[in-house]
Structures are given as structure tokens and as C-alpha cells.
Image (spheres, rainbow, N blue to C red):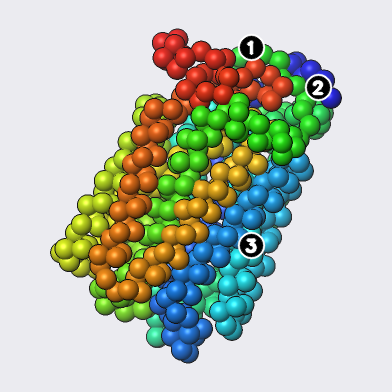
């Protein structure tokens, strides 16, 4: 069951490659998952008030909140189901299948006639997006060189807000009375998302399966062939490639672990890492979904913004969210994971708390409120992206997609599912103080999560994935996330 594969050092060969056009193609093809998610979430946020009109779907504020929660519920189920399949069947099969599910469901959303069908479509759309998170995060981390894994992962996760800007622009144009208007415009917006997904299915066909995954599943010749092709493409651009670093440890073929083995790794072997990952995912899920799914409702109810102009206020918000991971991402590789996670989580929490105080005091207008949120989410976007980065790199390859799925599901289920529904009720009260309570909860959660990461996080920057979390049959760190790959203390690793 465990034939040695030490002579095939695929991990080192992938990690020593210079950044190339091939890497850009992979990042662009796979990173569209976050663009699509941003498009979906923003469309619902931007058209939330429109969907309350009697000539559209006639939803209540609570039903708008429920639609957001059901989308997240679908994402949870999709992450768990497709995450397991990604570890078993491969990354490529799943990132093609999940994109197809998304395309069909979001197209069906455009034909909704009542809340029940709209809610069902949102749930199935979430299935596709949740599966994307598990398959895509695994594939990207396994294909991107270790020295830039942090900045690349954050930038890709931050591309959610490119989709958000696209969604805002689409809703602004399509909902305008002189174009399609609110009755038909929101339907065309969802149909556009489906067309983008179909185009990306064609692009993804050319992204290879992860050689790391193939090797661990005994498909040695296929892994070698794919890696040789990658190296040839990179060498054609950069010339002779660097030497392959020596192998310090033997890796083995390992069957896909069953649920009992997965839980043993999460709850016993890496229990500290699991606690930190859960805290990061839960906090960012509540923080983000609390604000964003109620964004349009707050602007229309408290600031009197017209329905078709809500999207204008998404642009500064999206800009802050895109710039945060792009500008702060390199620091996660240079300064280190723990320090930057703690810094971004802490500043996001303090910023939201201050904004909540100003909101209650009624010293903001719609424009200044949007600018405050933009500043807060400059840090929050990098923080949320680092949560996905943490989960995707601190557990063994055999269960990487499943680990992403579990923490995404638990964090989103506890934080993300409750937040839109809670804020729907809080906004419905029309009391600023009630809405500010939700902001306070989100602020406290991210500050605590950042402190936990600072104290117990893993120094994973610039390390090969196999050194951060060896094979489930190999050496391990005794279950303490504060230690390095071979059980050496974090301070000792830092001194080397």
C-alpha cells in the first residue's frame, strides 16, 4: 500500500521553478472561482432591495437574508461533498464539474418566479461555489512555488472583489431605468454569470492535474509526464532550470484516508492547527457575510440610496478589498504568516468597531460610510484570504481538499450562515443600535482569532507543503501547531 517514491522528487521540482507564463495561465484559469463568487454575492447584494419590489419577486428583508444564508448552506454542502471527491478523484475532474454546476444553477436563477425557486437556485449555485473552494485551493497550492505561495494565494482570493466590481457594474447598468430596468435587469445579470462560467470551463480544460496528487495516488508515469511538460514550457521562457534541491525525507503512496483517519489528524495529531484554522474561518465568515449581505439594505434603509444606485457604492468597497491582498500579500511571505494574520485581523476588527460607533452616532452619510467600509476591508480582505491560505497548507496532501471543505463548512456554517439572517432581522428593526450590535460581534471575533494565530499559528512561509505537513504515514509534529515540521520549536526554526 505504501510503495516508496523517494526518487521522484516532484515537490522540489515544482517549487524550484521560476515564475512563468505557465503559472499565470494556471492562476487565471483557476482564480476565476473567486471572481464568480464575488459576482454572485454582489448581484444579490446589489439587487436585494430590487427583489423586494412587488413587480419583481416581492421578497421581504428577511427573505433576502434567507437567500444569502441558503447560498452559503449550499456552499457548505458543496465543499464537503466535492472536497471529498477532489481528494479521491483528483483536482482537475472536480474543478471542471463544480464550475459546470455553478453555470447551470446561476442560469436557472435568472428564471426565478417566486422565493421558493429563487432560494433553491441560490442553494444549488452555492453547491458549485463550495466545491470550487475545496478543489481550487488544493490545486493552486500544489502547483505554485513555495516561495510565493502566500502572495499568490492571497491575490487569488482577493480576486473575489474583481467579481464584486463586475457585479456592481452590471447591476448599475442593467437596473438603470433607461437600460433594462429593475424588472428585467436582475435576470440578465445572473445569466451573464453563467456565460462567463461556460467560457472558463473551456479554459480550464488545459490546466493539468496536480503532479503531487498523481504521485501520491501511484500514477507515477502520468505525474512525470505532466511535470516534464511543465518544465519544458518554463524552460522555453527562462532557459535552463535551477538544480533540484536534495530530498530530506521519503514520501509514500497513500490511499485516500477515511473519515476516521481525517478526524484523527484534525483532532489529535494537529489539534492546535485545527483550533486556529477554525477560529480564523469562523471569524472571517461572520465578519464578511454580516456586512456584505446587508450592504444594500443598510444603504437603502438608513441612507435613502435609490435601488438602482446601490451598485455605485460597491466600487470603493471592492477597491479596498482588491488592493489589500495585492499590497499586503508579499508581506505574508517576507514578514511571516503569524504576524501578518494577527495584524490584518486586528486592524480589521478595530476598524469595524470604530465604524460601528460612527454609524450609531449618525455622523456618516452614504459616501463616507462606503469609504469607511473600504478602509476596514483593505485589511479584512487580506485577513480572510489568509484564513483560506492557512487551511490549505497546514494539513497533509492526502486530505487537503477535505480539510479545506471541513473548515470552510464549519466556519461558514457557524459564522456565514447566521450572519445574513441575523443582519436581515437587525436591519428590519430600523434601529442603528441594533445593527451596531452585529458589527460589534464581528469585530470581537476577528480580534480574538488574530491573537490566536499570533500565539499558536504555524510559520509556513516559503516552506514546501511536504515540510509543513508530511505524509500521513510520515513524521509529524506531535499535534502542536506551534512547532515546525519535525517537532522543532518555532524559535529554533526561525534561527536556522
Q: Dot 2, how many residues are within 10 Å of its Cα: few (below 14), some (14-19), or many (20+)?
A: few
x then y, percent, for residue 85: 73, 46
Relative height, residue 204 to residue 189 (above, below) = above
Q: Which residue is mark 2?
A: 2
Q: Answer with the quarter of the image where residue 77 lies.
A: bottom right
Asked whether residue 26 is in view, the answer is no
Q: Residue at x 40, y 39 (%)?
A: 449
Comparing 243 with 71, the one in front is: 71
Q: Residue at x 37, y 78 (%)?
A: 308
x then y, percent, for residue 312: 33, 69
The earlier-in-sequence mark between 1 and 3 is 3
Q: Is residue 403 left or right of residue 48?
A: right
Comparing 151 with 398, the one in front is: 398
Task: Look at the numbered disc 3 and give the secondary structure of its residue.
Answer: helix
x then y, percent, for residue 108: 64, 74
Q: Answer with the quarter of the image where residue 302 lies.
A: bottom left
Residue 278 - label: none
Residue 248 - label: 1
Q: CA distance from mark 1 to mark 2?
A: 18 Å
Q: Residue at x 31, y 79 (%)?
A: 306
Q: Residue at x 51, y 83 (%)?
A: 57
Task: Look at the numbered disc 2 and give the secondary structure of its residue.
Answer: loop
Residue at far bottom of view: 55
Q: Is residue 436 left or right of residue 323?
A: left
Residue 102 - label: 3
Comparing 108 with 351, the one in front is: 351
Comparing 337 with 148, the one in front is: 337
Task: Look at the numbered disc 1 and give the secondary structure of its residue.
Answer: loop
Amino acid at each position: 500500500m505504501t510503495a516508496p517514491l523517494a526518487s521522484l522528487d516532484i515537490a522540489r521540482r515544482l517549487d524550484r521553478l521560476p515564475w512563468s507564463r505557465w503559472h499565470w495561465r494556471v492562476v487565471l484559469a483557476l482564480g476565476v472561482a473567486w471572481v464568480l463568487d464575488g459576482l454572485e454575492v454582489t448581484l444579490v447584494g446589489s439587487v436585494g432591495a430590487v427583489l423586494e419590489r412587488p413587480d419583481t419577486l416581492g421578497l421581504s428583508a428577511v427573505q433576502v437574508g434567507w437567500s444569502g444564508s441558503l447560498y452559503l448552506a449550499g456552499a457548505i454542502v458543496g465543499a464537503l461533498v466535492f472536497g471529498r471527491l477532489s481528494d479521491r478523484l483528483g483536482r482537475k475532474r472536480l474543478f471542471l464539474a463544480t464550475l459546470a454546476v455553478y453555470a447551470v444553477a446561476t442560469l436557472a436563477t435568472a428564471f426565478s418566479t417566486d422565493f421558493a425557486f429563487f432560494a433553491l437556485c441560490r442553494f444549488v449555485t452555492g453547491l458549485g461555489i463550495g466545491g470550487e473552494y475545496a478543489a481550487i485551493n488544493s490545486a493552486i497550492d500544489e502547483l505554485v512555488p513555495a516561495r510565493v505561495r502566500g502572495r499568490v494565494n492571497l491575490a487569488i482570493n482577493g480576486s473575489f472583489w474583481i467579481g464584486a466590481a463586475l457585479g456592481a457594474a452590471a447591476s448599475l447598468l442593467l437596473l438603470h431605468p433607461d437600460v433594462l430596468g429593475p424588472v428585467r435587469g436582475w435576470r440578465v445579470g445572473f445569466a451573464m454569470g453563467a456565460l462567463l462560467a461556460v467560457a472558463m470551463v473551456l479554459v480550464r480544460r488545459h490546466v493539468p492535474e496536480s503532479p503531487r496528487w498523481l504521485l501520491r495516488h501511484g500514477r507515477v508515469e502520468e505525474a512525470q509526464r505532466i511535470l516534464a511538460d511543465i518544465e519544458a514550457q518554463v524552460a522555453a521562457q527562462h532557459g535552463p532550470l535551477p538544480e533540484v534541491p536534495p530530498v530530506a525525507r521519503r514520501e509514500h503512496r497513500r490511499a485516500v484516508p477515511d473519515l476516521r483517519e481525517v478526524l484523527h489528524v484534525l483532532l489529535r495529531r494537529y489539534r492546535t492547527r485545527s483550533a486556529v484554522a477554525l477560529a480564523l474561518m469562523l471569524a472571517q465568515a461572520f465578519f464578511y457575510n454580516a456586512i456584505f449581505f446587508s450592504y444594500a439594505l443598510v444603504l437603502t434603509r438608513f441612507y435613502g440610496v435609490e435601488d438602482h444606485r446601490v451598485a455605485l457604492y460597491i466600487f470603493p468597497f471592492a477597491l479596498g478589498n482588491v488592493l489589500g491582498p495585492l499590497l499586503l500579500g508579499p508581506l505574508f511571505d517576507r514578514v511571516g504568516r503569524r504576524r501578518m494574520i494577527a495584524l490584518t485581523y486586528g486592524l480589521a476588527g478595530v476598524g469595524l468597531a470604530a465604524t460601528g460607533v460612527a454609524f450609531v452616532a449618525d455622523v456618516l452619510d452614504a459616501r463616507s460610510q462606503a469609504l469607511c467600509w473600504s478602509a476596514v476591508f483593505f485589511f479584512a480582505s487580506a485577513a480572510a484570504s489568509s484564513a483560506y491560505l492557512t487551511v490549505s497548507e497546514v494539513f497533509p496532501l492526502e486530505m487537503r481538499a477535505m480539510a479545506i471543505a471541513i473548515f470552510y463548512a464549519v466556519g461558514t456554517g457557524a459564522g456565514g450562515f447566521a450572519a445574513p439572517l441575523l443582519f436581515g432581522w437587525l436591519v428590519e428593526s430600523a434601529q442603528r443600535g441594533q445593527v451596531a450590535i452585529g458589527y460589534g460581534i464581528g469585530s470581537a471575533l476577528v480580534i480574538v482569532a488574530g491573537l490566536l494565530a499570533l500565539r499558536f499559528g504555524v510559520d509556513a512561509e516559503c516552506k514546501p507543503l511536504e515540510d509543513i505537513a508530511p505524509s500521513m504515514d510520515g513524521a509529524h509534529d506531535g499535534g502542536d501547531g506551534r512547532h515546525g515540521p519535525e517537532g522543532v520549536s518555532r524559535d529554533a526554526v526561525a534561527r536556522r
